[in-house]
Each structure stands twice: as structure tokens, then as C-alpha cells.
Amino acid sequence: RRMWIREWYNCLAEIYATLQQYPYCDFWALSWDYRFQNILREIIDACPDVICLQEVQADHYESHVYNALSEAGFEGVYKQKTRASMGLAGKVDGCALFWRRSKFHLVESYSIEFNELASRQATQVLGMNPRSDEGMSYLNRLSKDNVAQLVVLELAQPSMSSRSNRDPINQVCIANTHLYSNKDFPDVKLWQSWQLLQELETFVMSRGTNLPLMICGDFNSTPDTAVYDLMSRQAVHPGHPDVNMNIGDDSSPNILPDAMSISHSFQLGSVYHTVMGEEPKATNFTAAFKGVLDYMWYSASNLRPLSCAPVPEEQELCS
């Protein structure tokens, strides 16, 4: 059964689209209204069945994104980051996940807060007192407000082959996330991706191992990182620099367990690497950074990617 899943580029929330951050851009090109109309046109032109968006500002989800995509035939859910406040109401970003109403029915919907997972890990697994120096240091390192979304979607009209199959696959699990962005915190990104996979393992296994899975999002991690190794190879090399950071002060503790414990049981493939033979040259292209940070991962045991949209070449992006 064919299904178009589109993991869109990070939307760049208005709170981050400043002339200080992007001095080479015209001010009108950074405005949300201008960018949203272009984003919406690209989404509609792509004709997706599932859309995963990151850095969607909370007030813009309410005022622009949901209404526009609802009119285009989509239903969706939103999860904002867990920081208490960024000043004015709604000025915080988050993740949004949409599906085409004519294609899918929503079966289950959950959100994951990495702050909550960090607190649970500190107290229930490691036995820390969250008010002790050790506990506060651990939680301060990990509490970055990032979130993930998880939905189970069911085909609205199962195919004839699915109806006749004794073990039909009429559902798919979609996860959407945005990991911590700071390049100096690869240990936090690895911890977040590991915890996400642990949560997904528990969820998928409890509903039968035949539930297809896709994990889409902005991982803020290039293909040479331990995050990419974990996603693609089920484990990380004990010698990888991301798991051997020399932090060296009490305010930034070692938050990772032994490298042999950082693993998962999914057999995941990268859509672009599978279809194209390699990751694209860039999914993030700015004056300060050009590289791959965004991925669509799929469970190779029960899903097969058939095609993927080409990423524009550098000369096209600069023209």
C-alpha cells in the first residue's frame, strides 16, 4: 500500500528568524506571513499523506497552520516545547504532525517530554535526589525542553489484500521530534535519541512487533555523529568522541551510561540513504552551516521506501 510521508524542513519559528541571526536575508523574506505562504504552497504541491513539521510557533499553529492544513484536508496534533515561558503568550515553538483525513483515521496520540524522561531517569533509574548537587547538575544538563510526538494511524480504506491477510498491516506508527540544537551538546542529543527509541520500543512492542514505524524530524546531528550511528546501526561505538566527552566540571556531569547500554532493537533505514544510496548534501543550508540534520527513518522489516523528493543543489539554493 503506497503512502506519501513528507518530513518537511524545519519551519524556522518567527522568534528565531531575526536579522541578527540571518543578516544576509532581506527583512521581508524573514517575515512569517511571507514564509508561511511559501511553505504552504510547497506542502500542497507535494501532495503528502503525512506531514511532520518542527519549529512551529504555538501562536502560529493556532492562527495559521492548523486552519490552512485543515482546509486542505488534513487533521493534526501539536506539542510545544516544555519551557514555562518565553515572554509573550504563544512565543514558543514545537512539533506539529498532520495526516490526510481521507487516507487515515487517528487511533492513538501521545507526546513525549524529554525533561520528564530526564527526571524519571534521575530519580527512578539512577536513584538521585533531584535537589542534591548531583541531581540538579544532571537535570540541568539534560533539561532542554525538547519534545516528540507519537501517533498511530489506521488506513481509512484497507486494501483487499490487507482484508484477506490473516495478519493485516493496516496501521502505521509515526514519530516526530526536534532534538536539542546546540552543537556543543552531542551527549544530550545522543541521550534524547536513545530515550526516544526506548519509549518507542516499549510502545511498539506492547502493540505487536508488526506495527510499522517511521521516525521523522530535525535531529540536529550530522551523519558522522553518534546519533546517526545509533539510529542506523542499533548501537554506538564505545570509542566515538560523542560518548567520551571530557567535560571535567561538576556542573556538566557525564549523563550517558556505558556505551554498550546505548542500543535499541529496531532495524531502521534512512529513506534518503536507501533510495539515493547516500544522504543528501544538505538539509540545512545557511551562511554559517551547510549539512544534513534532518532524517526520515523507517522500520526496514515491514516498510520499503519507493522514492524520495530530490533536495535542491547548491547552485539552485544560491540563485
Image (cartoon, grey):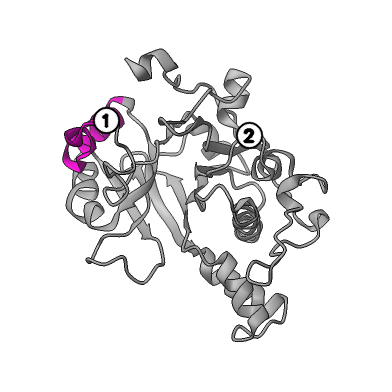
Measured as percent of width and height from the top left, residue 38 is found at 23, 31
Measured as percent of width and height from the top left, residue 294 is found at 50, 37
Rendered image: mark on residue 44: 1
Crowd around label 1: few <14 · some 14–19 · many ≥20 (10 Å) = few
Measured as percent of width and height from the top left, residue 128 is found at 69, 82
Q: Is residue 228 magenta?
A: no
Secondary element under disc 1, as helix, strand or loop, is helix
Question: Between marks 2 and 1, how big is the CA–CA gap?
Answer: 30 Å
The quarter holding residue 269 reads top right
Measured as percent of width and height from the top left, residue 197 is found at 63, 54
Residue 215 visible at all: yes
Image point (16%, 35%), residue name: 28
The quarter holding residue 221 reads top right
Rendered image: mark on residue 223: 2
Amino acid at pointer 1: Ile
Q: Is residue 28 magenta?
A: yes
Crowd around label 2: few <14 · some 14–19 · many ≥20 (10 Å) = some
Of the residues tagged 2 and 1, which is closer to the observer? 2
Image point (39%, 41%), residue name: 10
Report the front residue among 60 and 300: 60
- Where 15 sits versus 46, above or below? below
Secondary element under disc 2, as helix, strand or loop, is loop
Q: Main secondary structure of the magenta part?
A: helix
Amino acid at pointer 2: Pro
- Where 289 sits versus 119, above or below? above
| Range shown magenta | 25-45
